[in-house]
Amino acid sequence: MQEPTRKQRDTAEALDQAPADEGANPAASPSREGVAPQGPAVEAAPSEVEALQQENAGLKDRLLRALAEMENLRRRTEREVADAKTYGVSNFARDMLGVADNLRRALDHLPAQARESADPAIRSLIEGVEVTERDFLSRLTRHGVKKLDPQGERFDPNLHEALFEVPDESVPAGTVVQVVESGYTIGDRVLRPAKVGVSKGGPKV
């Protein structure tokens, strides 16, 4: 039998080693089926991030403005309700001041001597008028109406209405020396200014 040549022996050895090498190192040629492609993570573009940040800032600003408007509305409503409770009776109270004025005039026009010499029936009538006046003023006070008694006080144009001046050097100039008609306030507002006479000629304060 003729011996194989060297070329034939090399070819046969190469064929015998090929399967063994492939089986010994299967990772050398991995299968690509079912393998997800590897690559860098997907990130939003800078322009998209800036747009989202601007949108977020705009929504936050609108929310803060809405909250501020709601707070202002709540405070304004509370103030209006409080004013309605305090000043809702202003017109009615102003009309009732005439009743208080008439009661006071009736008492002021009664001479003290006539009162002392009056019979018991007339004296009881006078006392009834006084009680009525006190009760009427107390009811006005209960609704926030207060009477002003500026006699001897410094003239205040916000509370008083000067009708005339009285020469009087014994008191500082601008002092209320006579009250012609009492004034009244309701809450922090003037319901009716007091009509007064003011001194002049005295030392200035």
Image: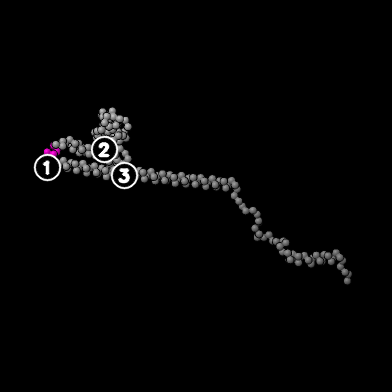
Q: What residue is drawn where x is 13% and y is 37%?
A: 114
Is residue 92 visible in the rendered image? The answer is no
Whether 117 is among the magenta residues is yes
- Quadrant occupied by the N terminus: bottom right
Q: Callout 2 environment at 10 Å: few (<14), some (14 to 19), or many (20+)?
A: some
Q: Where does residue 117 sit, x and y in percent of width and height?
A: 12, 38
State which region is magenta. 114-120
Q: CA distance from mark 3 to mark 1?
A: 44 Å
Marking on residue 85: 3
Mark before the other along the chain sequence, 2 or 1: 1
Q: CA distance from mark 3 to mark 2?
A: 25 Å
Is the residue under label 1 in contact with that under label 2 (CB below 8 Å)?
no
Mark before the other along the chain sequence, 3 or 1: 3
Is residue 201 visible in the rendered image? The answer is yes
Q: Judge depth for marks 3 and 1 and give the one in front.
A: 1
Marking on residue 149: 2
